[in-house]
Image (spheres, grey):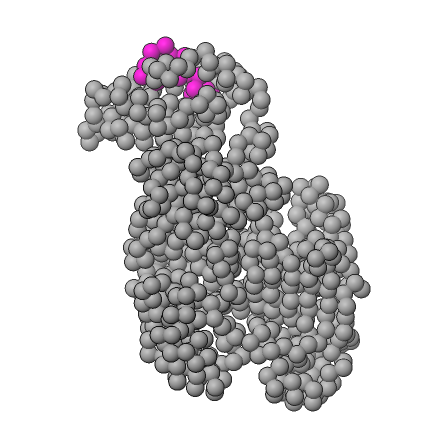
Amino acid sequence: MSNKLERFTQRARQVLAFAQEEAERMQHSHIGTEHLLLGLIREKSGVGGRVLSELGLEVLPVRQIAKRRTAAAKTSGPSRLELSPNTKRVLERAVGEARRMGHDYIGTEHLLLGLVHQNAGTAIDVLKELGISAEQIRRQTRRVLEEGPSQTPRSQERAYSLALLGFGNVGRALASLLKSKRDELREKYGIEWKITGVASRRIGWLAKPDGFEVDALLSGSYQSSITTSNIQDWLEASRADVLFENSSMNPHTGQPAIDYIRAALELGVHTVTANKGPVVYAYHELRDLAMAKGKRFLFEATVMGGAPIFSLFREALPAANLKRFRGILNSTTNLIITEMENGLSFDQAVKKAQELGIAETDPSFDVDGWDATVKVSALATVLMDVPIKPQDVQREGIRALAPEIVQAARAEGRPYKLVCQAERGDDGQVTASVRPAQVPLNDPLASVRGASSIIQFQMDTIYGLTLSEQDPDALTTAYGPLADFITIARTEASAR
Amino acid sequence: MRSQARDTVCVTGYKGPVVHAYRELRDLATAKGKRFLFEAAVMGGAPIFSLFREALPAANLKRFRGILNSTTNLILTEMEAGLSFEQAVKKAQDLGIAETDPSADVDGWDAAVKVSALATVLMDAPLKPQDVQREGIRGLTQEMVQAARRVGRPFKLVCQAARGDDGRVAASVRPEQVPSGDPLAPVNGASSIITFEMDTIYGLTLGEQNPDAITTAYGPLADFVAAVRDSA
């Protein structure tokens, strides 16, 4: 078997992996032809997936029928899953199909042809029940193969199906930014897209495979859409290629965002998040999972939404090792300090930040420095490759700073800032802290006022590189996920 | 640029080729399936060009503003600290930052060339240095510079370019007094800074502090890694 697998394409192997998942999901002891069929439907980019998609086959109904037809099947014990005799014959037949066609590889088209060559088996029964004949599949496969394998740009082939989880400020700003950039994305990047899934605690899990009307979505009308009950079914009903995960989460655990992202990557869906939690609490796991699935896990908006820190390091600073960073990463506290310098009391300043939509109703997460420690942890985890948790960061909030104190500090030319920093010591250990400190006027941090942020990097190759953003708004925050989406499309284009 | 004809990857630290032949060299490189990269040409330690190429897709630059010439910024800082113009030039020369003939820096030509390179590549507006309104720092005396710093509005040689409503890009290099809250104000000595205003992000600032020989060598190194990574 392993010998034969060497000639299987990446996509064909992915089909087998999906088939195995389907069998496990149904708790079957064997990987049957029905699981293979589901695997072929799920691997959407291969010839097999294209054929089945053009014939209108969807994961959910197929899974339901397959489940019903195999209700009596033996459930698996603790032992290893095996291939059913029919599945073995399909794989042998796939190898034969490839040989017959003169191909030196075994792809999803050969698997599909092998599958319909059998005249018996659960997959054939499922297809029959859905009114699709073996001959129809053979004909469609020939047609797709004659068209050539994705020589046409993706824009003409299929639009990206996007699923938006969380439809608050960021989700809505992203939808309208996508809409305003529609022509530019098509013309400059060859990207077509449609929003096929929207979900939030309030509206539930809604899917519309042919795409929601963006304006209608923004005005709160969700049209006639499919309602599902969990993330897996929702992603499948949406036929999602990319998940934008902007749900509300528990900042101390990163949940449920981590579970959502894990589920999406398991299903082979690229994932973009604006949530810091998954980066802080599960970065290495999610990164490795994405890599194993050949998908991307990106999170540009998590720290300084308006400054592309992560892609800067990933793409523009190869071979530079970060030794230290230092900055102002929490807008709320910086705004509060600025307003106290201008004469407001602490409570008035908090109220102003809340009115501007920057501070939460309960401001303690910002004020006590937790948000800043989460950001420091995310940066250290990704950029310095040390999995620091917020609890590992020495933390002091700004509650001790009274207006008189910050005004006096500003008057003597050494204003207070909530300074975040992390540094790798000679022993290789990274220590990090968040605490109020007075900075001299010639320090770039001194001139960062209001809701603006700044970060300075010290590397082995570049001594001091500073990045700052001025007064970001929701549009700025939506730009990070958009940039991540373009990165995904570029990755796919260069992999073709 | 002969290296492209031999199908090798070309990496340059000079601004000239970027300003005078960017489109030609870029198209030639694309046709040959090779890359033409120039990260060190402007702000050697801050990867401006790769930032836009890789990290800021679908962001349209409307305006930029910054301090791009280290020599003049160092001269202004030294004059504020009490040196005469000539003494400050001499100090910049001793530090290896200014040329024996400092006029390319002092008269604003170096800054104008950098503005042209940025406008050409990032705004797709092929400006030549002669198209940039240019005024150097020779008109600034030690007294003027010190007085301006005392009132909290120091002089800086400000470089900028902006796309007008008619789509045309207008650019200038000239000494200006900047207010104390301006990110340009605390940039002293041989440091540089640039602020970008885009349609998607209003204010993104990139600064580099006191680049030394190591950082200027880094630009070409990063380009080399980018070229090799893409062809792998």
Left/right of residue B176 with respect to residue A339 in the rendered view: right
Q: Taking A386 as reference, is A481 above or below it? A: above
Task: Give the quarter of the image for residue A393.
Answer: bottom left
Foreground of the two, A88 or B213: A88
Percent from the top left, x then y, of residue A420?
41, 69
Query: Where does the image place residue A313, in percent across and percent down from the top left?
Result: 51, 57
Quarter-of-image position of residue A442 = bottom right
Q: Residue lying furthest left in this view?
A: A77
**Along the line of sight, the residue nearer the viewer: A100 or A112:** A112
Residue A320 falls inside the magenta stretch: no
Q: Horizontal and vertical percent for residue B58? A: 58, 49
In the image, taking residue B133 as reference, residue B43 lies left or right, namely left
Magenta run includes residue A109: yes
User: In which quadrant of the rendered image does the C terminus of chain A lie?
Assistant: top right
Quadrant of the rendering where the N terminus of chain A is positioned = top left
Q: Nearer the viewer, residue A196 or A155?
A: A196
Magenta part of the chain: A106-124
Side of A282 relative to B70 (left or right): left
